[in-house]
Amino acid sequence: MLKDAEILSRLIDSLGAETAKKAFYRLQWVPEAWQALRNPEFLESAEEDAHEHAFHPGVLADLALAQEGLLAINPADPSLQAEIERVLRAIGSGTEPATRTLLDVGLLARHLLRLENSEDSLRSWAEAPGAGYLRWASPLACAWHHLQHPRHLFQILIRCGSPEAAYLALRSLELFVSEADRDGFLESMTIEERLFAFALGEIPGTPPDLMVLRQEGQQPSAYDARADLALREALASAQKGEFAAARKGLTLGWEIRNRQGALISDALAEMAHRQGDSLLELEARRQSLEAHATPARRVALAACLFSAGRPEDALEIVRPMDDPAGLILGGLIHLRLGDRASAASSLRCGYQAMIQGNIPLPTWLPRLADGL
């Protein structure tokens, strides 16, 4: 079996450094494909047709199918369908092996391509409770190369309401769609869907270490990869008695998970606000602040309380703040409560802070502060 460095060297020889870099980045998300390349014979077969897309996960999955005589046959051929059903039954019964082969991933990719021909089937797959998006990350990466309507699948994943599904869609957009074509995927989305998608897009999603995945027989999570890796490293450190390193890893994993939850709550609050659901917005703002407190989230919750007719509660949140937004909101709250002196003081402080920070001033701010 070839070592990782040997595979990477062969990729560079076949594709050139820049193209090999892109191919390697894609392959990090499909550990089954990388594992297949560790087989010298499989790598040699892949090198025989070296071109820009030669090491695309979908092309490698096709090669795995071809070596078993399953690529050239009709998609409706009973033998191919029997193999696909075999893998699907293993998933449904919970007997799927810990480490999948690239052949199994290729078969699941063919299943996705078959679902693409049926709107109802595709939507049912995406919206099924506990759909197991982590399990389908590699098959989707392999199927993307052959999808006839990738924009449609992208929209279904975004709209089904699952953070994991949305992140999977965004990851596919990043990996397999050129920057020039990405706007076409986003243009038909509603404002709420874009907010949700872009908030998730800010979640750190560094691919997990391939060696760790192979040793543990796990699939990568595009959604919480950094947290997973930090927790694994913490466990390994604890087993070695390196408790300081273990604590550091656990703290990092905890912080990443909290930030992920906060971003999702932010997106939910924005959608609730646009839909006029003040109760849901308030709860989402509160959860976001609890998960990962920042001045912006504190102001957002206070503004939500203020709009809901609870100025006293809003004031309790912004009272200790000294950033411009908090000071200005505090001034408006004092004004609502009839405390003109405190309102003027808070607004003037916010005005000065904005000037010092080169923050664009709303035209009403100086006039309001002076008028009080």
Image (tube, rainbow, N blue to C red):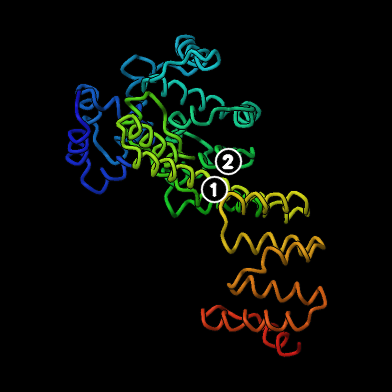
332 sits to left or right of 167: right
Q: Residues within 10 Å of mark 1 (few under 14, many from 20)?
A: many
Amino acid found under the numbered disc labelled 1: Leu
Q: Is residue 60 above or below residue 79?
A: below
Question: Where does label 2 land, which residue?
Answer: 163
Quarter of the figure that contains the C terminus: bottom right
Real-space CA distance between mark 2 and mark 1, rounded to the nearest whole angstrom? 7 Å
Q: Nearer the viewer, residue 367 or 159?
A: 367
Residue drawn at point x = 80 percent, y = 62 percent: 310
Sequence-first disc among 2 and 1: 2
Which label number is shown at residue 183?
Answer: none
Residue 188 seen: no
Task: Count the marks.
Answer: 2
Amino acid found under the numbered disc labelled 2: Pro
Residue drawn at point x = 20 percent, y = 21 percent: 41
Residue 340 seen: yes
Which label number is shown at residue 200?
Answer: 1
Across and down, in percent, residue 117 comes to: 58, 28
Across and down, in percent, residue 267 comes to: 62, 51
Mark 2 lies on a secondary structure that is helix
Residue drawn at point x = 56 percent, y = 52 percent: 292
* Quarter of image, res 215: top left
Q: Nearer the viewer, residue 12 or 311?
A: 311
188 sits to left or right of 49: right
Q: Residues within 10 Å of mark 2 (few under 14, many from 20)?
A: many
Q: Is residue 22 above or below residue 128?
A: below
